[in-house]
Amino acid sequence: MHKLLTQEPGKKLLLLGNEAIARGAVEAGVALATTYPGTPSSEISANFFNIAKESPLYFEYSINEKVALEVAAAAANACVRSMCVMKHVGLNVAADALMTLAYVGVKAGLVILTADDPFMFSSQNEQDNRYYAKLSGLPMLEPSSVAEAKEMVAYAFELSEKLAEPVLFRTTTRINHSNEIVTLGDIITPVTTGDFPKDPFNYVTVPAVSRNLHKKLLKNLAAAAKTSEASQYNFIEGNNGPWGIVANGVSYNYARDAIRDLKIEDRVRLLRIGFSHPMPSRLVTDFLKGCEKVLIIEEGEPYMEENIKAIAQEAGLTIPIKGKAEDLFSRLFEFDPGMVRKNIARYFDISYTPVTPIDLSDIPDIAQRPPNLCAGCSHRATYYAVKKAAEGKATIYPTDIGCYTLGLLPPLSMADFLICMGSSVGTSCGFSKTTNKKVISFIGDSTFFHSGIPPLINAVFNNHNFTLVILDNGTTAMTGHQPNPGVDMDQLKCSGYGRVSIESIVRAIGVCHVEMIRPFRIKKSIEAVRKAIDFEGVSVIIAQEVCPLYAKGLKMAMGKPFYVSDKCKNHRDCINELACPAFFIENEKVKIDPDTCVGCTLCAQICPEHAILPLKEKSKIR
Amino acid sequence: MNPAKMDMRHMNVTRLIIVAVGGQGNLLASRVLGEAALLADIPVRMSEIHGMAQRGGVVESAIVFGNARSTIISDGEADILLGFEPSETLRAMNKCNPNTVVITNLSPLPPFTVAIGKGQYPDLHLVQSIIRRKTKKLIAINAVELAKEAGNVLAVNMVLLGALIQTGILPVTIDNVKEAIKTRIKAAFVKINLKAFDLGFQSAQKN
Ligand code: SF4
């Protein structure tokens, strides 16, 4: 049985934040869950995917976040408890659905999880999605710990039903990817089918209907404000003043630890905001009234700070309230306990000597260790083929989101522009129209399904001129090898799925020049790429080769390792052009680590001396 | 155990940073420690950054034992630094202060940037002398050799775990950790892993 289905209320488990969130949903009787994978949220849905195999839960990897939200919105309006999980930027994709879903509301609980990523550990921006709650008029909950996240998810379903609105549940990476001891609760048996009685004048959002629905939303928002005032997730700790601290999310933990470390428990009142939209104005007013001076600790934007200053103004309070400032907290990146301790000490003028850090000035430069495409990754071969085929041409390489974005790094250097999912194709239209360079763009299979298709239609219709390379490695590799519509689900021993062919889509769109390549047949691939880039108009190359890490996970047959024989003349084309992590240098000679090499043969094909040969027995080198 | 002592174990906060290269098994090592703390009834919180672990990047975990709520550790605030790879141990020196105890594996895994001439791998003697000079104590062991001796090079994480527990700085006992190894690791590998743990423990004693 899946560990998150354990029926032992009271049992303590060490859980990852994302496991605790999935468990919270299971305890609340979630019956339908949807997602498009994205770090730091991915393990929530990875767990749902497996839980669904042995429980009544219906789970799907939807094609993108907008579709995921639409599926869940319908289910919740058919009276089925639903959850929709995505990373923060995913909510941008789903925002169109979100804004009007807020008007329509829900009948059964719908929890929309947005995983924000301060510091951008694995994201293209660090937008603060609390503003989506404000923009849409929906309630928002934010946990401070893993254990609280589990409880709060279950509460979010109740809240959603009480208010008849979806609830936004915001985490940050340090919640998703922290482990903590969590106590299991009871599991509610999910109700998997409901009904949707026709009621078009409340559900079909033509202007006349929406004018009424907007009124309804404002009423619900007022009810949410009342609930927020009394919520157990907004609370004050410490009865003493005169100093006030307001904190949310993980900042609350850092504040609590700092108050203890600085021994100022008897001088501070701490307001923790966990129900952050709407803000509890009365609670905040009462809190402010007992303080001489207030510090607001929140990662990201000054969301609470703006609110609290407005509340203070209403109440005629003129005490100093600060948060984001040059000498205090930044809008940039994530916070840490030491930074919070230091800023609390500075703001309230408490004497405090931080630990003496060690002197790092005489530590020598250490070679960087950036992540790299795996040994045997087919993207390396495709990039090499395109590079060779485009040699001598002035190029622009718009790229997209996936493992292949690592092609940015030298020596491949095959990425020039990226803003969001699918942008490789859309930006190719603009670059090819406005420059005289050859535009060749890259997109992975999953990203193509997510948002690469409409811009490709755009390109054909508007008669643009560029080459799109679709890197089809049969999985959504970057986020942990989730399926996508092009994946052969039999390989995952899952039945009842369809399969969509990328080639058929591309041809149906009307792309006249389509080349199918197997990137490890390097000569043929270079030839095919040459033809495609010489074509005037939109051409598409589909590079098909399974991701070796995925293949390894599925125990598919892998190639045999290679070694560098003594025919090697040490000009190092292999290392310098491919930078495969299986290479290393020993005694000034190129070597291949047989435990890392998966036998893709790429280096053997490009070695001018034909010095790289299949290894018969592993003992030969090392 | 007497209640007063137990309280101390809860009150005191011990902060551990583990750095490794993707694939070295440090996440499993931190899970084992978390499980051991659960068995010992010690509050524990851990965080990890593992987005690119499988693409050869650096993986860092922070484990906070005792009565704290934070799951991450600020620069200069680690009580112990455990490095699975010598150059990564050195790179993580920003987490240390003069009272930090450092444990490092001595077998290098040079990053590919070295192979393509985009950086230097630091000299191992220099690495050790710098760390020794700047921190309270350095325990340096060849974990790969000991793992091989235990029967599987992949048991490097258990060797290092053994050395870590030997320092006595963490509020968990040898038995807690061995018990946790048994619950977290597949039965077939438990014996080798326990042996690796013991070898690491002994080697730290001699250090
Ligand atoms: S996981 Fe797959 S796609 Fe990603 S870098 Fe590794 S081999 Fe390439």
Image (tube, coloured by chain):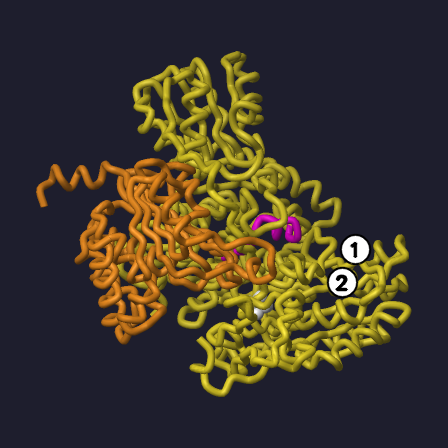
Chain colours: A yellow, B orange
Q: Quadrant of residue B150?
A: bottom left
Q: Would residue B74 be visible to someone looking at this image?
A: yes
In this image, B199 relative to B64: left or right? left
Give, as a three-letter code, the residue at label 2: Ser
Of residues A74 and A471, the one nearer the viewer is A471
Q: Are marks 2 and 1 in contact (CB under 8 Å)?
A: yes
x, y percent for residue B57 = 51, 57
Determine the chain carrying the residue at label 1. Answer: A
Task: Examine the rendered structure and indicate whether residue B28 appears above or below residue A473.
Answer: above
Give the left or right position of residue A602, taking residue B80 as reference. Answer: right
Q: Position of residue A396 (x, y in %)?
A: 80, 58
Q: Quadrant of ligand 1?
A: bottom right
The label nearer to you, 2 versus 1, is 2
Q: Tell me if I can see residue A150 in this picture.
A: no
- CA separation in Å, label 2 and label 1: 9 Å
The residue pinned by badge 2 equals: A441
Residue interval drawn in magenta: A82-94
